[in-house]
Amino acid sequence: MTIRDEVRSAVRALSAPSPAEAEGSGKRAGTGGTTSDLTIDETLLLHSAGWEPVDLVYGISWWSIPWGAWQWTTGEVQEASGAFAGAIAQAERQLRESCERAGASGVLGVEVGIRVSSHHVSIELTGTAVRRVEADAHRFEFVSDLSARDFALLTRAGWWPLGIAAGASFVVAPRRSAREWASQQGQNVELPNLTQALYLARERAMERMQRSGSAMKAEGIVAVKLREGRASSSVRVIQFVAIGTGVHLRTGEHRSVSPEMVVPLDDLVRGFDVKSLRSAGGE
Amino acid sequence: MPSTAGDELPEAAARRLRPGAWSSGLSVADFASCLDMGMDPVGYVQGYAVLQWSWFMGTGGMGMGMGGLGGGWAGTPQRRGQYVEQWQCPHGFVSAEHRMYGANYELTWIEESWATGWGLATGRMLDEAKALGASGIVGVVDEMRPLFGGTVEFRASGTAVAVPDAPRPANPFSTYLCGQRLGKLIEAGFAPVSVVATLSAVRMLGSCVTHYQLAGTNVGTWYGPAAGGVSGVGPVDQVNRAEAAARSLARERVRGQLGADILHGATLESSEREIGEGDLSIQCTLKGTRVRRFKDFDPLPDALPVVRLT
């Protein structure tokens, strides 16, 4: 069947009553079908691996940071780091609960939104709950920010996602002494107070991410994304956030996927019959 | 100007849509792809609607002190099934600067205004496609943007296509997809039915505890657990409930439009606007293409991993 035949079949199907109308069910609002933010490529790839999308799910959490946490201090701002940890744990828990309510086994392609302000941290997680096509019962297995393509590749290699591993640290860099400030004027030199603050934030954030991976019994964390630099709330506050997916080896040993090498020979310019344009608007 | 879908087109539009050179909003690659699929472009169709718009209408009950719910605030939700939750001050009366109540409630007037504007724009776009004898509209682009003070413009546009040798549906299909992505969707056994979109809006009038949390002043026993509040670092429950409600409303409303069909390629976007100290207006839009399975699914074989040598 050519693509033209497929298109004609699709349009013909739209001329017929929809399945719900045909059944005369007058399907009630809120009991409708699947929602998914996956692309068609991802949907097809998931199907080829034996999975299907079920529902769009989300988790969102705001945690407060008390006044004064950022002031009159140097070193890590424990309140901000704690608020981040609490918010992401709560958002992930909501995601998991939504997944279970939808009768799915996992959540894929989770987009992570992070906002840090003086008085609160907010975390937003949005993804698509998926389940096995053939299975009758579905128990919760994972939350992951991997794409469907990465998920298919990972599972084929014998690994399995478990959950989102994350860590964050917010550090206030100490001020330079007057002597340091004066001696550094007019020179391009390293500012050790800021470098050290960045290193401290980095060590804490990475350690927390690895600890959260260990807590979910992950053997490793893949696709780690880093967000580091100046926090918006102050010029001397350095933030470091690390997020990835905790994975473990399910098959006992890693399976090589042995990719084949290809040289694409397709031309970027596709040809078409100009005369076919005449059939559209009539003569 | 047509007021709803199905009305007659304006004379100028009818003149423009008469047979002649057609127009298209497709890129050359998508254009070539559509021709390959047997979809002939017949016109670049559009629909517009300009609405008077104010985000701050009906904001009664935003004062401090003992007013609000007990005082009969103008924003009190009236409709059955409308989302609403209330919070009470755990402290007892403190001062006129201390809000004794808190509420999350759905802003149905914003939702209805948005649905009206979006429905008019997409309906008018569909009217043009019908007038052209199209089977559907591909590559739909829609947006809402401020026009000038107190007004917003809803616009929807796409390329109407005809499918020769196939019966024309009573209502042309519409989809955000075009080109190869649309081809793959159809090859996978899904027929595009229509673009679907909704906006949900929730207003959060922060209670005293929420105010303290958002201002970072929830420290000490007076504001903390002993008084029913949350001291220091902790979840801002009222905001979390409002954010979750906005997303849930959007998802359920879209589900209600799907029947037994599927929402493909959904995009969920949300935003917050601070409308006063510790008060938020939260909007959430959910869009996608409603698709219907028209043939049995034929799973692909396992994908072959490759390394491109380019």
Image (spheres, coloured by chain):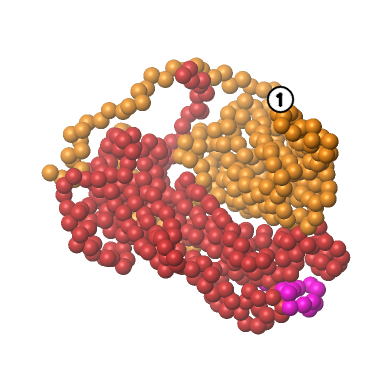
Chain colours: A orange, B red
Q: Which residue is outermost to the left?
A: A283
Residue extent of the magenta highlight: B86-100
- Residue drawn at the location 57% of the way across and 18% of the way down: A258
Q: Is residue B307 left or right of residue A240?
A: left
- Residue drawn at the location 48% of the way across and 20% of the way down: B308
Percent x, y of residue B102: 68, 71
Q: Main secondary structure of the magenta part?
A: loop
Percent x, y of residue A28: 48, 63
Percent x, y of residue A8: 29, 42
- Residue drawn at the location 67% of the way across and 31% of the way down: A222
| Residue A122 appears anywhere in the view | yes
Q: Is residue A159 left or right of residue B1?
A: right
Q: Quadrant of the N terminus of chain B?
A: bottom left
Above or below, A228 against A258 in this view is below
Residue A55 among those drawn in magenta: no
Residue kind at label 1, given as amino acid type: Gly
Q: Quadrant of residue B59?
A: bottom right
User: To which residue does mark 1 refer?
Assistant: A252
- Of residues B305 and A177, the one nearer the viewer is A177
Q: Quadrant of residue A184?
A: top right
| Chain identifier of the residue bearing label 1 in the image | A
Residue B89 among those drawn in magenta: yes
Above or below, B199 against A38 in this view is below
- Residue drawn at the location 33% of the way across and 34% of the way down: B29
- Of residues A53 and A69, the one nearer the viewer is A69
Above or below, B46 against A229 in this view is below
Percent x, y of residue A49: 54, 33
| Residue A203 appears anywhere in the view | no
**Callout 1: 10 Å neighbours few (<14), some, many (20+)?**
few
Q: Is residue B149 left or right of residue B27?
A: right
Helix or strand or loop: what does disc 1 sit on?
loop
Q: Is residue B40 left or right of residue A78?
A: left
